[in-house]
Image (cartoon, helix red, strand yellow):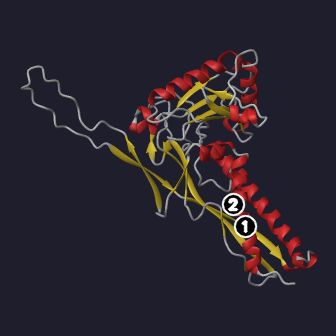
Amino acid sequence: MAISNELLSSTLFSIRDGEVDELFQKVAFLDHAKAKGGIEYEDGGIKIQRPLAIAEHSSITALPTGYEPISLAVSDVLQPAIYSWADFAAPIVITKKEELENQGEKAIVKIVEARMRSVMGMLRREVNKQILAGTSTTLSDLGSLNGVPAAFTTGFLEQGARTIAGQTNTVGGVQKSVVDVEGWYNWNFDAGGAFGTNGLRGMHEIWTGTNSVAPMGEIDCVIMSQQGFANYKRALFNQERYIDEKSLDGGRMALLFAGAPCEADLAMPDATVNGAGLEATAYFLNFGGVKLVMHPDADFAVSDFEHISGTTARAATLYWKGQLIADHLGSQGLLFNGDTF
């Protein structure tokens, strides 16, 4: 019995929701962004624009007698950060030969589903790697949190001091050293290659600093390197730990910091990526200030199956359109050089 393009397409559409859910299960950034409001949808437009308040509009005039002239000198308050969309696609293909060798509707459906899962898994790994480390060769148009190496001039989080000389990256077309405002410099702490001595102190300093300037909320999650996560657990071994009751009920003990869940991710940039002593041990993320913006019609959207001209194969396309954007970097933090206990 011949299997129509419509049947193959409907098979993909029927499993698409499940596949998107699976995408978020094991990817720390996407998982927590989805749960904490770190994902937004924006319709169309050639660019993504985010308004930044970077100046005081006017000055205060003291009136000791009441006759003093009021200064009417004012400044523009807003400056837009502008981001380009990142677009990518991946095909899902089945050939006539494979159809004939797998006769029966169920067999063909299994092939399509397996390939769908494979493509989704590939995209999940690449998106995750690019956001956390900035090292994807195919998704380089997508922004990254990693701004530690000198060559990563558009990465959001830097290891330098919160000054015009310490942090100079350009995010959304807005250079940190030019605007020179608290909210556009991320917090950071050098653990000095000794997490056991400096790690917890650094985490507390970052948490305190980010909350002192965050316009909304506190740190939503802490994404750590595998070794950084192990070091954190080791540092807490003889101390009181706070456990999320829902996770405990599910049989999984959740490691938290100041109420924010901590997750280990293998894609975190190590010394091989960032250089010796510059490995990103932990990102402290507040999703009020960093978001993943996606087009509502290109959120891992699946096209219909169509025959490929000149071949016996037919293919569908998985399409994604989005960008990582920053609204407020002062509410974000970086702990680096802490992969050694």
Q: Quadrant of residue 270?
A: top right
For the residues marked 1 and 2, what is the alpha-carbon distance in whole angstroms? 7 Å
Residue at image location 73% in from the left, 79% down from the top: 6
Q: Which residue is mark 2?
A: 17
Q: Is residue 315 above or below residue 163?
A: below
Where disc 1 sits, the SS reads helix
Q: Which mark is residue 170?
A: none
Q: Residue furthest left?
A: 67
Quarter that holds the N terminus: bottom right
What's the residue at 70%, 35% (across, down)?
A: 246
The picture places residue 333, in percent across and down from the top left corner, at 56, 32
- Which numbered marker is on residue 14? 1
* Residue placed most toward the observer, 198 or 259: 259
Picture layout, residue 99 above or below residue 239: below
Side of 108 where 243 appears, left or right: left
Q: Quadrant of residue 256?
A: top right
Q: Is residue 199 left or right of residue 211?
A: right
Provide residue 258's location: percent of width, then percent of height: 60, 26
In the drawing, does residue 168 fall left or right of residue 118? left
Q: Position of residue 44 (x, y in %)?
A: 49, 64
